[in-house]
């Protein structure tokens, strides 16, 4: 897992030069990967024995306080607030 995190940080490093972009690190065990841009979410579900690149990805738009997007956004925010910022 450490190698995957290191690889992801290397691939996403150029994003740190973009305005209003932040990468944070955490120690939470996740059951999906959530990528967020404003109210747009990409949720890559984890399936045992399936590489992440082959697992389903849901594109969700947060529009109110209910529904699937809201559930994943709440999960994202809980982890984000306790994660530590990653710098170059």
Image: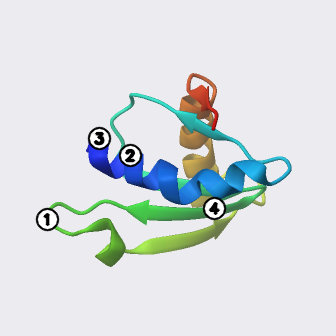
Circle nearer the N terminus (4, 2): 2
Circle nearer the N terminus (1, 4): 4
Asked if the residues shown at circle 1 and circle 4 are in contact, with their CB atoms under 8 angstroms apart, the answer is: no
| Residue in the picture at 58% in, 35% down | 24
Where residue 18 appears, x then y in whole percent? 80, 54
Q: Is mark 2 on a helix, strand or loop?
A: helix
Would you say residue 36 is visible in this rendering?
yes
Q: Is mark 1 on a helix, strand or loop?
A: loop
Q: Which of 53 and 75 is in front in this view?
A: 53
Circle nearer the N terminus (1, 3): 3
Residue hosting label 4: 41
| Residue in the picture at 39% in, 28% down | 27
State which quarter of the image contains the C terminus: top right
Asked if the residues shown at circle 2 and circle 3 are in contact, with their CB atoms under 8 angstroms apart, the answer is: yes
| Residue in the picture at 54% in, 40% down | 75
Circle 3 packing at 10 Å, graded few (<14), some (14-19), many (20+), is few
Asked if the residues shown at circle 4 and circle 2 are in contact, with their CB atoms under 8 angstroms apart, the answer is: no
Where residue 26 appears, x then y in whole percent? 46, 30
Circle 4 packing at 10 Å, graded few (<14), some (14-19), many (20+), is many
65 relative to 79 in the view: left or right? right
Residue hosting label 3: 2
Residue hosting label 1: 49
Residue hosting label 2: 5
């Amino acid at each position: 897992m450490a190698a995957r995190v290191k690889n992801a940080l290397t691939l996403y490093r150029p994003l740190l030069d973009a305005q209003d972009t932040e990468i944070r690190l955490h120690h939470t065990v996740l059951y999906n990967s959530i990528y967020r841009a404003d109210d747009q979410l990409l949720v890559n579900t984890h399936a045992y024995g399936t590489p992440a690149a082959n697992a389903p990805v849901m594109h969700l738009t947060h529009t109110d306080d209910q529904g699937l997007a809201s559930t994943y956004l709440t999960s994202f925010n809980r982890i984000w607030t306790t994660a530590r910022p990653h710098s170059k």
